[in-house]
Amino acid sequence: MIRKSKGLLATVIMGLVSFLFVIADYLALHDIWHNREPSLSGEWSIVSLSFVPFLLFHTLFAICVVVPYFNAQKCNRNGNAEKPKEP
C-alpha cells in the first residue's frame, strides 16, 4: 500500500510540475511567435526542456494509475476479486 501511495504522490507532483511547464511553454512560445527578443535560444531551451516532465508525468500516470485500473478490471471480470461482505 505504501508503494501505491508513493507512486500516486509522485504522479501528482509530476502533474503539478508539468502544469507549470505548460505555463512556461505558453510564455516562451508567445515570445517566439511575437519575436520580442533578438536571441530566442532561452525560449527554445524552455520548450525543449519541458518535454522531460511531460514524458515523466505520462509515464508515471500510465504505470501508477492506468495499469492498476486495468488489472483490477481484469480481476473483476474473471471473478478473482473478493466479494464484498453483506451486512
Image (tube, rainbow, N blue to C red):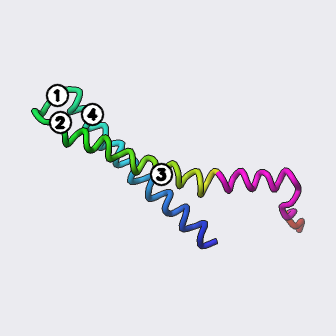
Q: Which residue is mark 4?
A: 29
Overall secondary structure of the magenta section: helix
**Could you tell which of marks 3 and 4 lies nearer the N-terminus?**
4
**Could you tell which of marks 4 and 2 lies nearer the N-terminus?**
4
**Could you tell which of marks 2 and 3 lies nearer the N-terminus?**
2
Q: CA distance from mark 3 to mark 4?
A: 21 Å
Rendered image: mark on residue 35 = 1
Query: Outermost residue, top direction?
Result: 34
Camera-side mark, 2 or 3: 2
Q: Do tag 2 and tag 1 residues touch (Cβ < 8 Å)?
A: yes
Quarter of the rendering containing residue 48:
top left
- The quarter of the rendered structure image containing the N terminus is bottom right
Q: Which residue is mark 2?
A: 40
User: In the image, residue 39 lies at what x, y percent?
Assistant: 13, 36
Mark 2 residue type:
Leu
Q: CA distance from mark 1 to mark 3?
A: 30 Å
